[in-house]
Amino acid sequence: MNREFVGVSESDGLVEAAELMGSEPTEPVVVVRGSEPIGSLSTATALAAMLDGDPGDRTVGEVMEPPVPTISPDASLADGTRQLIARGTTHLLVVDDDEIVGLLTERDVLAATETAEAPTTATPATGTGATEAAEGGAEIEAEGATEESVQGICEGCGSLTPELSTVNGQLVCPDCRAY
């Protein structure tokens, strides 16, 4: 899942929301009331609404779509995949105790699946609970796991990279390993 998402209010202007969508590479925009997700706005819906009349007078609430389907952060990747397919959507909102914690997209699932199926290139850690020092002095708890270098999307910055490594339970690129 991507922990970053773009949220707007239903009272925000459509033009401002469209500008935000243009500057942020994410879809959909989540429409929130306080912290509660009440709708969504896709690029296609925003464009159609802007072409239909004067967009300067319209609000997000007038053109928003139904809320994005939700999933628990504790759900498995397989469950997330099944829900994406069953609901016929490209994304699920990850919600924990009525708080939005991220967005799961088809792209995330593909990256995770590719990473899970990619061959590992490093040596397994020795013993259960072994600790290895990572770049930058961070420690990795390895419980029978392997230090792997695979292609996918970095969970730290979201970039596609040919070199991901597991650090503190996250797959991160070389730039994010230093943090």
Image (tube, grey):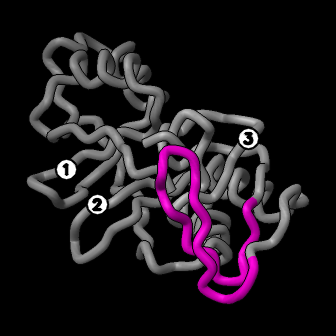
Query: Dot 1 corresponds to which residue?
Result: 32
Query: In the rendered structure, which segment of residues is drawn in magenta?
Result: 126-147
Q: CA distance from mark 3 to mark 1?
A: 36 Å
| Left or right for 171, reference 21 | right
Q: Look at the image and say whether residue 144 sits in the magenta stretch.
A: yes
Q: Quadrant of residue 177?
A: top right
Depth check, mark 1 against mark 2: the one in front is 2
The image position of residue 131, as x and y in percent, is 58, 73
Front position in the image: 173 or 155: 173
Could you tell me residue 15's position as x and y percent? Answer: 24, 16
Q: Amino acid at mark 1?
A: Val
Compared to residue 142, the image places residue 53 above or below, namely above
Q: Which mark is residue 163?
A: 3
The kind of residue on which mark 2 rests is Ile
Nearer mark to the viewer, of 3 and 1: 3
Q: CA distance from mark 1 to mark 2?
A: 10 Å
Q: Residue at x 51, y 79 (%)?
A: 75
Quadrant in which residue 31 is drawn: top left
Residue picked out by circle 2: 100
Please name the amino acid that badge 3 sits on: Glu
Q: Is 158 located above or below residue 105 in the figure?
A: above
